[in-house]
Amino acid sequence: MGYSKENNGFRRNLIKYETYGDGQIMTNIYDMYLWDKNFYNNKLGQGNSEIITQADTRGQLNNGQSIDYSIGGLEVSKYKGLTVTDRMGGTRGICSDIVRFPDQEFTVICLSNFDDLDPDPWRAALKIADIFLGDDYPHLAETRTINESSKKEMILPKANVDKLVGTYFNDLNKDFFKISLIDDNLYLNSKKLIPVDFDSYKIGNWSVKIKFSQLSTDSSSLCWQEFTFPDKKYVKRDIVNYDINSLKIFIGDYKCSELGLNCQIKLKNDQLFISDSKDKESALEPLFKDTFKSSYRGKEIIVEFKRDVNKKVAVSMNTDLLKNLRFEKQ
């Protein structure tokens, strides 16, 4: 049982996953303590020390590129000159982190049944580490990182932050999110972004980093960095506002020959709607040029209109589990 903010109060979140592994793993502080102890007195694999070495070493892709995650899924980084491994996680009503300083044999474990802790588990763990490991930090300016060294150091120039605000789109996966600025803090949709470097952020209590890069003076992109998607790139796109004449070209009946499905694009009250064969309608909200979003039976859909050399219009439907389902205009 976990809790989330709701209006001026809280709501209960009872998690009932049908799969195990990514969630549904129950633990407690004592079990995590035993797990942590095994790093220093390994009993796995007949005591093979290589298992521990791999868990504390950054992974390497086939092209030689180093990534932040070890073969065991732990994130390996530096904090104030010390090696640190951690694994942050969370779901509705729950957030957690285990932060290990292997060379100092020091670990902080944070488990919470509230998903909007402030500070979040990562930052809370580092504040605790500061109390106990202060004498171990190298006293050299160049070894200090921006990671939580102080609130002031983590505040980036507002002019730089303003350039990051906008809507970002991944053309391969057909998904997007919005970066907004609220009370001088950046948010990815509703998740607060926590600076860990001058161009990198952690996403709330997720084990994910995003890294921004400037494509030009007017455009930026970001890479979604996690061990399963180390270089998933999103490009900042401008939201398009359509006039009535621009929308009329999309109106018509469409057919998917692959699945024998039909849909219709209508224009009502200056807005496009998509309807199925049972006349169930969903509004199309403009995103980018020729790209809209909609919702069907609770599932978000990215709708892309395409034109061939003869200016014949087709539409492509995309969800998280379905890509490029094509409907031809009749």
Image (cartoon, rainbow, N blue to C red):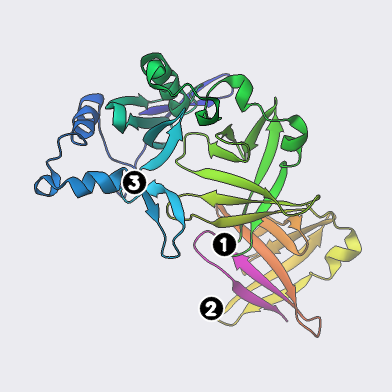
Q: Which mark identifies residue 57?
A: 3
Disc nearer the start of the sequence (3/2): 3
Q: Quadrant of the N terminus?
A: top left
Q: CA distance from mark 1 to mark 2?
A: 21 Å
Residue picked out by circle 2: 259
Q: Which portion, as a residue range, is magenta?
A: 314-330
Q: Residue at x 58, y 35 (%)?
A: 193
Q: Is residue 228 left or right of residue 292?
A: left
The one of 46 and 124 positioned closer to us in this rendering: 46
Q: For mark 2, give the secondary structure.
A: loop
| Vertical side of 217 occupied by 251: above or below | below
Q: Which mark identifies residue 80?
A: none
Disc nearer the start of the sequence (1/2): 1
Q: Find residue 219 and report its horizontal and vertical position in percent.
A: 76, 52
Q: CA distance from mark 3 to mark 2?
A: 47 Å
Q: CA distance from mark 1 to mark 3?
A: 30 Å
Few, some or many C-alpha atoms within 10 Å of disc 3 (few <14, some 14-19, many ≥20)? some
Amino acid on which disc 1 is placed = Asn
Q: Residue at x 77, y 53 (%)?
A: 216
Amino acid on which disc 3 is placed = Thr
Residue picked out by circle 1: 173
Query: In the rendered structure, does residue 322 fall within the stretch colored magenta?
Result: yes
Amino acid on which disc 2 is placed = Leu
| Vertical side of 167 occupied by 113: above or below | above
Disc nearer the start of the sequence (1/3): 3
Q: Residue at x 72, y 57 (%)?
A: 284
The one of 82 and 313 positioned closer to us in this rendering: 82
